[in-house]
Image (cartoon, grey):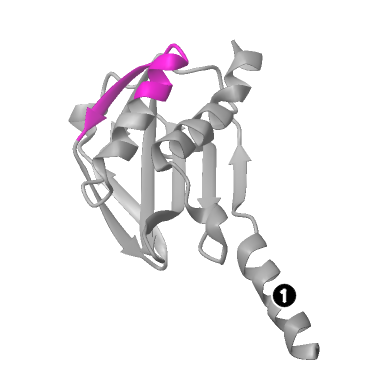
Amino acid sequence: MVRKILIVVFALVVLGGCAATQEISQISTPAPNIVCIVKHVAVKEGVLVALQEEFQANGMTPTVVDGAYELKHNLWQPTWSPEQVQSCDALCFYVANWSWDLATYMSFANIWMTDAAGSAKIAQATYDATRVPGPSKFINAEAKIKELTSQMLAGKRSHQ
């Protein structure tokens, strides 16, 4: 009897699992017209496409620029060419990691925006499913990126 109860409790924990966490800080400045997205070549192309589509859906013009991302002190440090971002009102950076558990899934994503100089963060959205044991971690990554971006930009309406 005790064994059956333990099996049921374990199944509920595994199937129910913990929910993925999301942290959003909405845009804290007037909406930028032109957002330069610094491309992260190590991230699946669908993330960049989703970002471009969501910026367009929010009335902004996304421009993709070349850049590099280096992991330093457990944080991603992007670099870009200042000449490529001269016409930008804001910069957007992103990272996304995929993991394997019966299938691949997006286990982590972080999107952040800065002012045109790249010196002051104006918005950020983070999704973390790294500790989710159940099936709820298998989501549509592009839809999640759009949702995060939309929530991050929701504050722009109050600054226009």
Q: Position of residue 129 (x, y in %)?
A: 53, 58
Q: Is residue 20 above or below residue 36?
A: below
**Crowding at mark 1 (Cα within 10 Å: few <14, some 14-19, many 20+):** few
Q: Position of residue 156 (x, y in %)?
A: 58, 19
Front residue of 110 and 31: 110
Query: At 31% across and 27% down in the image, what residue appears?
Result: 36
Which residue extends farthest right?
A: 1
Front residue of 130 and 126: 130
Indicate the secondary structure of the residue bearing disc 1.
helix
Question: In the rendered image, which quarter is residue 46 located in?
Answer: top left
Question: In the rendered image, which quarter is residue 119 located in?
Answer: top left
The quadrant of the picture occupied by the N terminus is bottom right
Find out whether residue 60 is within the magenta segment. Answer: yes
- Can residue 17 be seen by looking at this rendering? no
For mark 1, what is the residue? Answer: 8
Query: At 60% across and 23% down in the image, what residue appears?
Result: 154
- Can residue 146 be seen by looking at this rendering? yes
Q: Is residue 92 above or below residue 9?
A: above
Find out whether residue 157 is within the magenta segment. Answer: no
Which residue extends farthest bottom?
A: 2
Query: At 62% across and 63% down in the image, what residue appears?
Result: 15
Front residue of 91 and 135: 135
Q: Is residue 45 above or below residue 135?
A: above
The quadrant of the picture occupied by the C terminus is top right
Whether residue 18 sits left or right of residue 87 in the image: it is right
Which range of residues does the magenta coloring cover? 53-65
Whether residue 20 sits left or right of residue 82 in the image: it is right
Q: Position of residue 155 (x, y in %)?
A: 62, 23
Q: Which residue type does callout 1 highlight?
A: Val
Query: At 43% across and 15% down in the image, what residue appears?
Result: 57
Q: Position of residue 43 (x, y in %)?
A: 28, 49
